[in-house]
Image: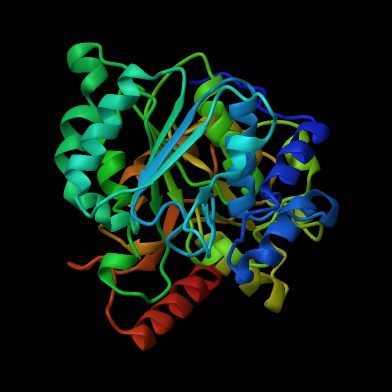
Amino acid sequence: MLQPVTTAVPLSELQLIATALGRVPDSFHPHPKLDQLLRSRSVILQSGNVDWATAELLAFGTLLLEGFPVRLSGQDSRRGTFSQRHAVLVDVETGEEYIPLNHILPHQKSFLAIYDSPLSELAVLGFEYGYSTQTLHGLTLWEAQFGDFSNGAQVIIDQFISSGELKWGQHSNLVLLLPHGYEGQGPEHSSARVERYLQLCAQYNLYVCFPTTPAQYFHLLRRQLLAPIRKPLVVFTPKSLLRHPLVVSPPEDFTEGGFQEVLDDPAPEILPDRVTRVLLCSGKAFYDLWEYRKTRKRWETVLVRIEQMYPLHTEKLSAILRRYPHIHSILWVQEEPQNMGTWAYINPILQTLMEELSLPCRIGYAGRPAAASPATGSFLLHEREQRALVDTAFTL
């Protein structure tokens, strides 16, 4: 298990980067629709809420200032698939490009290289894997436009990323960013095939993570370079949560602490002695459950997030469960069908953990039934399924 890594950054350094994110040369003409975005990023640390995309750019900026080059490629990655990143700006009059993070300080040595790659995942991911093996001193990331698009590069994932260290002693710290979350957009735009990566996990060969807050994502990216051990990292990133009002982090979450593999319930209404139900989940499911509970005031139920699925930090999870002495039921909640997602991987681990903790309950499941397709193509059916699984989590 990876030992805790300090990834916090002083507020003054974060502000230096935020200022650069909102600054362009006097002769540069960004698109008028980006004016408000640039202004808000420059003062975002004063507003008290940092969103996902800005947290990512802050992580990149801090690594650049510490001398680590950052390279990101993917389909529409410069702007961001969901128009969230805008790491590369284009002059609407001349076509000239400007990358704010390459101009944080006058004599900056390290740089951000970001590319919009073609729809040839096999070739692009193969190149980025090879690049990462020769650039362990830098952060190399590949982003799928949607998580399922990594299907086209499965041979690289199976034969190189997951097993290259064991087969050939070939080290890599490549990061895969896979947008994942069920929003009714259909089979190829929902699942990132979480189950496939978990089936590849053994002998501490990968990190598989589901950060649910901007600060968690920030610390996770920094940990990837600051940790003494280099391993590939698979990150299931959000889609609708990119602009969700709850998915923000205050500045102090960036200036303190580090990445947390398991997150306890932060709701102030929770009284541990009155808790009878624990819902374990990852990713977007947490926010669906949070809003349902808040509306119905079900404060006897706590929501515990698994932010790092592999290696699973069972000690932290055990410590959290021990806080609640009157648990009657524990359920794993996921958006994916039962034969996909995390259930098959985590169920036996949780069953063993229950025996070790002597908890008088079995692990239940709340999610979609088994299916051949990762998601329905009907938005109305998707909405019905989503309501059902959330309701089941609180009533089963």
Q: Quadrant of residue 318?
A: top right
In this picture, residue 127 sits left or right of residue 114: left
Query: In the image shown, does 391 or 150 lie closer to the viewer?
Result: 150
Is residue 230 depicted above or below 238 in this figure? above
Q: Give coordinates of residue 123: x percent, y percent.
A: 18, 41
Residue at horizontal 59 percent and vertical 28 percent from the top: 64
Residue 185 appears in view: yes
Q: Give coordinates of residue 275: x percent, y percent.
A: 70, 56
Residue at horizontal 44 percent and vertical 78 percent from the top: 388
Residue at horizontal 44 percent and vertical 72 percent from the top: 389
Q: Give coordinates of residue 227: x percent, y percent.
A: 53, 19
Is residue 154 depicted above or below 230 in this figure? below
Is residue 291 depicted above or below 62 in this figure? below
Q: Give coordinates of residue 155: x percent, y percent.
A: 14, 39
In this picture, residue 26 sits left or right of residue 227: right
Query: In the image shown, does 4 or 70 lie closer to the viewer?
Result: 70
Number of callouts in the render?
0
Query: In the image shown, does 268 or 143 lie closer to the viewer?
Result: 143
Q: Residue furthest right?
A: 46
The structure's colour scheme is rainbow
Residue 213 appears in view: no
Q: Quadrant of residue 329?
A: bottom right
Residue at horizontal 57 percent and vertical 18 percent from the top: 3
